[in-house]
Image: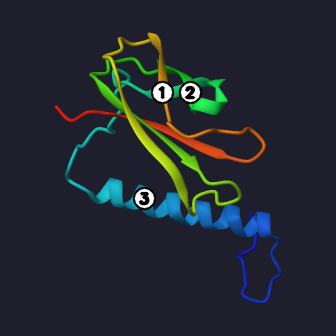
Amino acid sequence: MRGQLSPKRTTHPGQRLLLAMLLILGAAGVTAAQSNDRAKPTLPNRRLPDLVIDHFELTNPPRGEVKIQVANKGGGNAGTSTLRLIVWKAGKFEQKKAATVFAKVPALAAGQTTSIVVMAGVPIRKKKHSISIDVSEDGK
């Protein structure tokens, strides 16, 4: 039988983490055992869409033209979405915007990919400017 953990005993960080995890798990077990609810764990819904920016390339930097590949990596279909492209001023990443443009992305079935071309309307130089791209499904 192991000895009890006394306050004077030195523990290593790994031991403290393990002890904390055991205390949390033990407390959770007691709560579940004392509960009259027979709630089943909620499993993640594998049928949800997951829109991601798969790839992008500057196709015409002086005009600010960017070709963006959007993929639905999830298990469900995605409705129409809105893509946002932000061009940040040189040396001012996430501080000062040079341009923000929005583009519509068509509905994508699970596993489907599409490419769209977005015009920022300002020059984009690889070594000077930063860009941010995100996409979100439109509300239904």
Q: Earlier in the sequence, mark 1 or mark 3?
A: 3
Q: Which amino acid does label 3 sit on?
A: Ala
Residue 19 image point, x, y percent = 66, 66
* Residue 44 makes an appearance in the image: no
User: Circle 3 is placed at which residue position?
Assistant: 28
Cα gap from disc 3 to disc 2, whole angstroms? 54 Å
Q: Tell me whether the residue at label 1 lies in contact with that at label 3, contact meaning CB atoms closer than 8 angstroms.
A: no
Instruction: Give the quadrant of residue 102.
Output: top left
Numbered disc in front, either 1 or 3: 1
Q: Please provide percent x and percent y for residue 106.
A: 33, 17
Residue for badge 1? 118
Residue 64 lies, with reference to residue 16, above or below; the image says: above
Query: Residue placed farthest to the left in the image?
Result: 140
Q: Residue 87's quadrant in the figure?
A: top right
Q: Which residue is drawn at 44% across and 27% down?
A: 51
Q: How crowded is mark 2: few (under 14 residues within 10 Å), some or many (20 or more)?
A: some
What residue would you read off at disc 2?
Answer: 65
User: Spatial distance from mark 2 to mark 1, Cα to Cα?
Assistant: 6 Å
- 52 and 92: which one is in front? 92
